Image (cartoon, grey):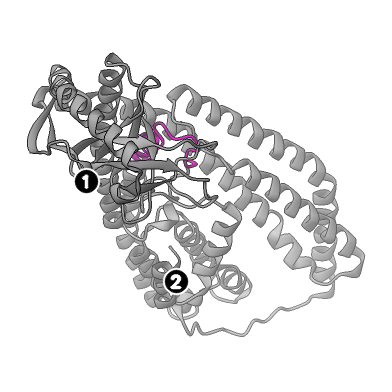
Amino acid sequence: MSGPKIDQAELERQRKAELERQRQERLRKIREETEKLNTEISSAKAQINHIDKYLHSEIRNIGDAEEMASIIKKLHELKISYKYQLTNALGIDVPTEPDAIFTCAQNLAGKTNSIMANYSNEVKPLEKRIVDYNKQLEIQNKLNSINFSTEREKTKNIEDFDFTIKLDNVAQSDIEQNVKERAKQILSEIEELVNSESIQESDMKDLLAIASNIYKTAFETNNSFEAATIEYQVAKPQIVKNMAIFDDIYQDYYAEYVTYLELLNSHKTTPVKIVPKRKYRFGSIDELQSEMALLAESSKTMSEKKYIREQIDDVMQKFGYDMSSEIIFDEKHTGNHYICENKSKPSAIHVYLSEKNQIMMEIVGVGKSNTNSVTATIIQSSDLEAQERNILLNEQVSFCKLHPQIVEELKKRGIILNEKKRNAPSLEHCSKIIRTSADDNAIMNESSLVNDEYDYKEYVTKRKRFKKQGMASRLKMMESKF
């Protein structure tokens, strides 16, 4: 394209500071409400985990008892059904208004409570049957004086540590009762920490190694076991502290993400769904902080661009033009392109705002189209009829008189346009923009920071896979998938 008036846009320092103050104030409000929402999200996830583990040990005791097969089957069916309902409830498109986020949190809390109340009512009769059967089984076992023996299993890979099997083995072994209970307690604590979304990959690896050591030494001497427990007690406070730090930073990240996408969706006819990345997608505090810093910087830049566009709209309306509508050409054209039309004129003003706040304004012809598409193509001067080029040339002359007035009006609004290049009217500068049919896959200036739509079922699957795979495999999978 040619015939542009090119300037470097610069916001006055006070205006820039005021925009950032407003952004930070909105960020604070959004953080307050998203923290409440995340509390309810965590609660729903905890309930899914509760359902998953509910009566697990009791069912293991029953084994393959034929008379309980239908009861166990029904329990599994209920678990699947209610976990699915909770999973669906977690499929939230986070709104951007603080009041709407608050309502979203309340709705999720109501759904979670209702689902769990229904689950409890349906599962109670089955629970009673299972508990009664286990009591009978225990009595029968005592009467028959059945002695259980368990082969002491060696852990080959700490990454394959199965807490359920290890806890059962500890419970059924003939080691000292005190050591047995303490080993069970510590392994249960470690399992809970390892399963937390807030744990870093490095801390998870350390805990799995400690769990392996706790399990192995529980079958050895008291001194060996005591040394293993001390190792855990020394490591635990820092790991718990890291998790608290992670959670706090994540709340900042979550609010920053919502604010960022709100700005990204400004003026979009089809907004991107707002689904911040979940905790498990970040392997460390540093990784989370890095992405939050990128979001904050991008958000600040977009806030300034949004203000510039709004002021351009205001100025254009002052001179009889419509508010700008965004258009996209192809992947080669970066930045933002806008068209401001005046129904009484045979031309429009094409405004281009670059990534570095360079502003270009030029006169263009606008082709007639039956579509309101945001996608467009450019017809260069050489492909235009002579009559149309002459009309556009006259429009360029008129624009040369209008442009200084636009510059002055923007200055009043705190936007300084520093001249870089002001081209004179010329036939070679004539061009025409025609809107084309929208492609279903057309994306307007998407950002690599935008996350895919959240799928909690996928999250659960991946998280379980993390527990079963080696640490190197987990990290490799994170690099390729996340």
Foreground residue, 294 or 467?
Answer: 294
Identity, as a three-letter code, of the amino acid under mark 1: Glu
For the stretch drawn in magenta, the main secondary structure is helix
- Left or right of 236? Residue 21 is left
Give the residue type that dot 2 points to. Met
Q: In the rendered image, which quarter is residue 267 located in?
A: top left
Q: CA distance from mark 1 to mark 2?
A: 54 Å
The answer to whether the residues at label 1 and label 2 have Cβ atoms under 8 Å apart is no
Going from the N terminus, do you reach mark 1 or mark 2 first? Answer: 1
The region drawn magenta spans 251-273
Q: Is residue 355 left or right of residue 452?
A: left
Circle nearer the viewer, 1 or 2? 1
Q: Which residue is mark 1?
A: 428
- Which of the 4 image quarters holds residue 98? top left
* Quadrant of residue 206 within the rendered picture: bottom left
Q: Which mark is residue 477?
A: 2
Crowding around mark 1 (Cα neighbors within 10 Å: few <14, some 14 to 19, many 20+) is some
- Residue positioned 36% across, 55% down in the render: 331
Element on which disc 2 rests: helix
| Residue 377 image point, x, y percent | 40, 48
Please give left or right for residue 284 compared with residue 196 in the image: left
Q: Residue furthest top?
A: 318
Q: Is residue 59 visible?
A: yes
